Amino acid sequence: MAIESPIRLVEEVVNKCVERYIPYSVMFELTYRCNLNCRHCFIVKDGNINELSTEEVKNIIDQLVEMGTFFLAFTGGEIFMRDDLFEIAWHAKRKGFLLTFMTNGTLITPEKVEEIRKMKPVKFEFSLYGATAKTHDYITRVKGSFERTVEAIKRLVECGIDVTIKTVLMNLNVKEREEMEALAEELGAHPRINPGLAPRRDGSLEPLKYDLSFEEMIEYLPEDYDGVMLSYLSEKSKDISDRFICKAGKAGCCISPDGTVYPCVMMPIPVGNLREKSFKEIWHTQPSKELKRLRNLTAHDLTTCPSCDLAPFCIRCPGVVYLETGDIVGASPSACKYARWRKYVRTHHGNTATSIGGLYYEKTKGR
């Protein structure tokens, strides 16, 4: 009897989740508060947001159990701004979730390291924006943040925690790309270093002034630099245009600090609020017209992308399209730029790689 590979089995599970609208992966934004003030921050600062209480968060976690979720990521803002983080995390741990923590690490004390060691989450993801304190602290606008983040990474690696260092490449740090890869290796962490910035959630294009220019991509990115494919894109489809349709709102979603449910952290289209309806009502029994539209979207609904000559080189994120244009069916100016770069690299350097790389749109949010 043939034994299927683990990768194949995972793909089949994910496909079943998509077909049945099972939110197997959920990103929970516990707060928008942050102790850093990153120049490219994704979050719109709103001090008036009414954050979910500890019990409200626990109740939502219980609902996610019933919905079939098994990957749960805590993010912000900065998650360690919440005093009840460990109470929430232990509740989720006892419910059987595979936990990921996304943080800037600057608030992780030795006492918190010990608590993390006991909990043993699947992984910790740290945002680090430079190989030097000068660069990182300039981007975060907080002196000493580089040193504190690196120290937290060291402590967790020493405890045997799986650590990923996430770096979004921009014109402020791209010259340190190789040094950042070396630093991650030195620290014993996995590097995830990729280009691609997105507008703020209110549609402001201000963060894009830090995005790489075409000339900077050619000068500083290696010829075989494919980056990381956005996890939601249907990369395996034989039809190139089908890659432009993602799993957001089908097999994954994002929950904001006030209980608003979005299809994806990159797609701030509200489809319901968990203070007003249950997750089951929002997701299954009473889906909003916005959620229905997203789920019914096919490549044929897209206005230009399927027939574009850059399609073989393009990785299109519907969420970024929405932030850039106000809708989800058009072309993404930033995706077009990176597609032109990939085409240029393969045309001028004879790169015959069959894997078409993607952008990793860092959900920076001030971390």
Image (cartoon, rainbow, N blue to C red):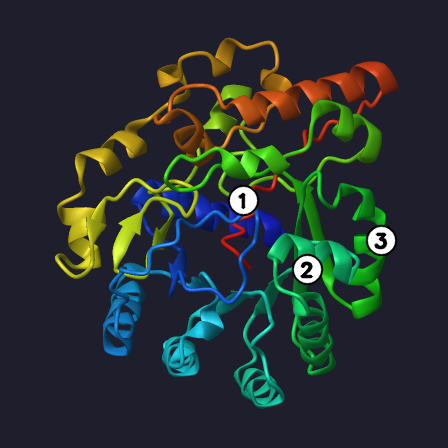
Which residue sits at x=81%, y=48%? Answer: 176
Tag 3 near tag 1, CB within 8 Å:
no
Which residue sits at x=55%, y=59%? Answer: 367
Mark 1 neighbour class, 10 Å CA radius: few under 14, some 14 to 19, many 20 or more = few
Name the residue nearer the viewer: 252 or 225. Answer: 225
Question: What residue did someone put label 3 on?
Answer: 179
Name the residue nearer the viewer: 93 or 203. Answer: 203
Q: Earlier in the sequence, mark 2 or mark 3?
A: 2
The amino acid type found where label 3 is placed reads Glu
Tag 2 near tag 3, CB within 8 Å:
no
Viewed as shown, does residue 238 lie left or right of 137?
left
The amino acid type found where label 1 is placed reads Ser
Q: Nearer the viewer, mark 3 or mark 1?
A: 3
Q: Nearer the viewer, mark 2 or mark 3?
A: 2
> How far apart in space, not on screen, are marks 1 and 2 (Cα)?
29 Å
Label 3, secondary structure: give it.
Answer: helix
Which residue sits at x=31%, y=69%? Answer: 61
Visible in this render: residue 222? no
**Image mark count:** 3
The amino acid type found where label 2 is placed reads Asp
> How far apart in space, not on screen, are marks 2 and 3 (Cα)?
16 Å
